[in-house]
Amino acid sequence: MSLETYRLTEEPRYHPSADEVALYEAAYQMRLPVMLKGPTGCGKTRFVEHMAWKLGKPLVTVACHEDMTASDFVGRYLLGPEGTYWQDGPLTRAVRHGGICYLDEIVEARQDTTVIIHALTDDRRILPLEKKGELVRAHPDFQLVISYNPGYQSVLKDLKESTKQRFCALDFDYPAAPIEAGIVASESGLNQQDAERLTRIAGKSRNLRGKGLDEGASTRMLIHAGRLMVAGLPIADACQFALITPITDDPEMRSTLLAAVDACI
Amino acid sequence: MLVSDGIKAAALSPALRKAFTGPDRDAYLRAHDRLRGAGYGAGIARAFASAAARVAEHAGAKEAIALAGDASRIAIKARPRVAADYLDLCPGIAMKVRGADDFRQWRGMIVSVLEGSPKALGALLARSEMLLERLGLEALCTWTQTGLRVGGQDSDQALRFFQLETPEAQRLLERYAGEANFPSLETGLKSFHTALWRHEPVLREAIRDGSNHRVRRTGFSNGIIRMPSAFPGFKGQEQRLYRASLAHVGAHAAYGGPRFPLGQLKPLQVAVISLIEDARVETLALRDMPGLIRLWLPFHTAAPDGLATAPNLFAALARALIDRAFQPALGWVGKGVAMFDCASDRLCDPAISREIGNVLGNDLGQTRVQFDALSYVVQPAYRDDNLGLWDLPDDPETPPASDEIEADLQDLRQCEPGDRSPDRKQEQTTPDTPALPDAVKIVEAQTEGGRKVFSLPEYDHHAGVERDDWVTVNAYDPIPGAPGFWDALQQRHGTTISRIKTVIAKSETGKRRRLKQQAEGETLDLDAAIDAAVAVRSARQPDPRVYACIMPPARSIAVHLLLDISQSTADPAGPGISILDMERDAAAILAGTMSQLGDDLAITAFSSAGRQDLRVTPVKAFGAPLDETTGRALSGLRSGFSTRIGAALRFASRGMDDVSRYRKLVLLVTDGEPSDIDVADPEYLVADARRAVQHMRSQGIDAVCVALGPEAGQRQSEIFGRKSCVQITDISTLPNTLPAFYLRMTR
């Protein structure tokens, strides 16, 4: 089975904030593994999609969760009518057929499972399938990308030092206000002026990061709010619906955020 | 009917004849006669006659007649003058409250104040119409009850409360009136400022300024923002007003320049320059956050055609500069607006405030408009006092930046034991055992080392209310005692410790979990079974662990151990040992066992010296290791002061909010019933502690009690319930009793 279905057919829009495209291209040229750091909803996943499309490579995405085991990455034997058969996991598939494997929020996976990528991320570029007794050598096109949000996870959820040191890392943050407004406008179809107001509101919520809020409003949330405004909602309602209510359950913090939104419009 | 009554009845005014008919008229006449004959002066009887008719109209004849009895009691216990005031007041009150029942409740409240603090009754009567207006009857009764409790035995204190002179009276008044004040809004205000201006502000409540006047406007200096404890007269708008004020101060910080030098400027010029500067920073802030106009504008209420007095002119100019639709008929204001508009292209330069302000100030000076700098209050209410804008190095009017810290110190000084009555139980006595040579030093260290942590509510079962911020918690650093505590403990109770360990380890607590890939278990683990089948077919050795099972619950307990170290724990518990010694050992044994089992434990010792000083000594915090420091802190504990159990329980349960364990438990080790120097009623603290326990249980925190010593136990089981309380007379029985608590946790 090849990875044709994993190929992107349309260009995912991405607005670079700095030279991250060039950096990534250099890393891909050398097939170095890349780690993307940054808060949720700032465009990490979109960036990987954009790069995969740009490089013309298939993209295999795995969203990690806390019950994830090594078999969920590399594959397992299943019971079939003829007895058992081996099913490649998403990582193995990308390794075998040559694609970019993107492990989203890698720290969510159990720590012992992350060591399976070690042999893939140094110059050996191999994936041992212990249960199958096979050693898969990585396809020349294969590259590993992981994402990692250092903000909200507790100290318990951190990457091992030995894992961290295998990656080049790109630091992502919410784009600067004019760029973010442009992104919000183009993604949601909102006019530029309202998009600027939304980014100013997001700035206020990001001021409270770590001071009552785990995270400020993300670019993704702003796009949602923008779309709601295109659908006809007034800005205050759209902000309450798409930004404030999802972000916190604390009534006092909600009231504060509402007041901050009100100050900006 | 008496003959004389018949004669007088004919002389009654028509209003009285209408109000009192049949037997009521007799009763009225008799009451009137008694009052007149009692020698309080003719005025009282006249006041009664006048009040009775009108009260009868609104609250019925019975209530009206009862006024005579009230007046008589007031005249005796307070002064006849106060009784006359009372009678004059009653018709108005009867009109305001609804019907006889409410009026009776109001009378009852007056009588209770008369009983509790006769001296303060006059002050209460003088303000009661205002208070009733602001609070309503129910809340007024609660507020006066609280006032009596604040006063306690101290009649001057009660008097000051009812004169509304203490900050606490004001604060409680605001709270019961449902008005938001600074303490209730502080957290939200902090995040509002942070959201708007990115950095977290240092907010302080300013109650009195340097000359002991109530602070009416926000002020800022050296990075500290001092906000008034309340803005009276803005009911329903408090939050918006505080936010408006904070946004204004934030604008100063964001767009203001360095402080203006005062130079030779007159107060009038200072006021005008400050006003222009206010408008300048607000205009700049509005460019970034146009919505702030909706926050600020409602407080600009200046009329366009007021008298040309300085405060009116200032208010009008302030409004005209921010509200372009406002066009006052005052030439001076128009000139100010025009000059401000001219400078609109260099608004970022603070110097324009001085330029414009100087010109406008001179103009105003020449028109000889009177300006009283002392009584001037900046308008509108959200603006700051302007002191932060000026370089006023030696001005005594400037409140010191650290005024709040001074107030805190004063608070602490007030709770020093030296101020207390020399009650044996409460006094900080020097222990008479020679083993404590540094006892004197300890006393000093304890009173100096306290720092306010937070305030806690308390429940008054008489009034049926929970009073917020009633008890102040002060933390005192532990005093290190003798080293080698753990070794000594092992020597004293070696066998006991090992027995406890086996008993406790058997008890189960925590959440059940499903375990896969086990060698034994109830069901087959499908994944493991497939793996095994695969291994067999590929001629490898299969893993025999193909079962799944439900794991017995993992231990997940956090215990907050509260040690009562009040003065009574210095009493002997047996030959050569005090109750405190016994507590210490029990706590240490429990702590040792728990730490070996991986349970989380905090130990806090507590005592109290009135509601202003719940003294807590943190011996061990959650997550901290159980080591030599803990041992020394334990052995350094000394008996002293009283036992406010409810407050201590609230403190302990609050400390468990952030602890993530499956079961949480507060374990109180005490030797007696709750008591404190400012509480005379023994039921009060018991009821409060019971309420604290109920509240904790509703939050999923269990509360249990170990009562030490032969006399303890009775009141504790009233507080904690019989099942949650155990009495221990001999420490050797601990191994049998402690597991009972652990079993409770597995419910």
Image (spheres, coloured by chain):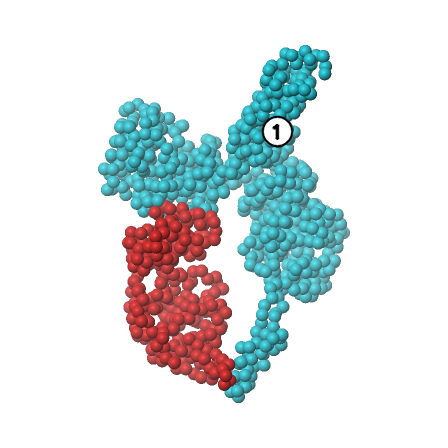
Q: Give the colour chain B carries in the figure.
A: cyan
Judging by the rendered image, the residue that carries numbered circle 1 is B100
Q: Is residue A222 left or right of residue B709?
A: left
Give the image location of residue B435, x and y in percent.
68, 50
Residue at the bottom extreme of this rendering = B539
Where does residue B194 sit, x and y in percent of width and height? 40, 48
Q: Is residue B258 visible?
A: no
Which quarter of the rendering shows the N terminus of chain B? top right
Which quadrant is the C terminus of chain B positioned in? Answer: bottom right
Q: Position of residue B185 (x, y in %)?
A: 47, 43
Number of numbered discs present? 1
Point 37% across, 53% down: residue:
A202
Return the chain for callout 1.
B
Q: Return the x and y of residue A10 as percentages of the image width and height.
A: 30, 69
- B489, B625: nearer the viewer: B625
Residue sitting at x 34%, y 52%: A232
Colour in which chain A is drawn: red
